[in-house]
């Protein structure tokens, strides 16, 4: 129809800021793991502080790495790597101590 205006479809590319949650899941894993292992001795409410500290330290690592890298997907991957290295240090230390040759 000549007199009616059709709505113009404007294609906008919206940049959505994404927060990747997997570093927080990796940071939460050791706390939940210890909670499950000791389920008969402690309750879930006893782990609130540990969960809060884990979230805080994961967020701090994410923030510091974000200031350096500025790409959210790379920051999330690096933060996950840092958390895995941090939480596996004790296991790695015991492994190396046990398998170290006598000097």
Image (cartoon, grey):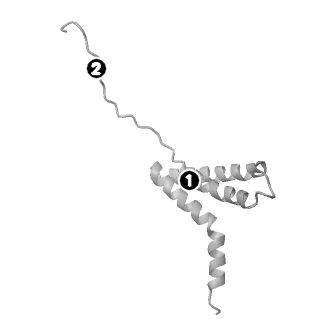
Horizontal relation, residue 26 to residue 68: left or right: right
Residue contact at pointers 2 and 1, CB within 8 angstroms: no
The structure residue drawn at horizontal position 63% and vertical position 57%, both measured from the top left corner, is: 29
**Count of numbered badges drawn on the protein:** 2
The structure residue drawn at horizontal position 59% and vertical position 60%, both measured from the top left corner, is: 83
Alpha-carbon distance for marks 2 and 1? Answer: 42 Å
Q: Nearer the viewer, residue 77 or 39?
A: 39
Extreme right residue here? 41
Provide the residue designation for mark 2: 8
Q: Nearer the viewer, residue 38 or 68?
A: 38
Badge number at residue 23: 1
Is residue 70 in view? no
The structure residue drawn at horizontal position 26% and vertical position 15%, both measured from the top left corner, is: 6
Extreme left residue here? 2
> Residue 47 at what x, y percent from top left?
75, 52
Badge number at residue 36: none
């Amino acid at each position: 129809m000549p007199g009616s205006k059709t709505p113009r479809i404007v294609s906008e590319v919206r940049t959505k800021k994404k927060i990747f949650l997997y570093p927080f899941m990796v940071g939460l894993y050791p706390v939940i793991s210890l909670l499950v292992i000791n389920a008969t001795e402690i309750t879930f409410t006893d782990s609130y502080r540990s969960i809060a500290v884990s979230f805080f330290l994961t967020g701090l690592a994410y923030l510091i790495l974000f200031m350096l890298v500025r790409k959210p997907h790379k920051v999330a991957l690096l933060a996950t790597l840092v958390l895995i290295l941090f939480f596996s240090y004790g296991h790695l230390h015991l492994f190396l101590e046990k398998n170290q040759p006598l000097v």
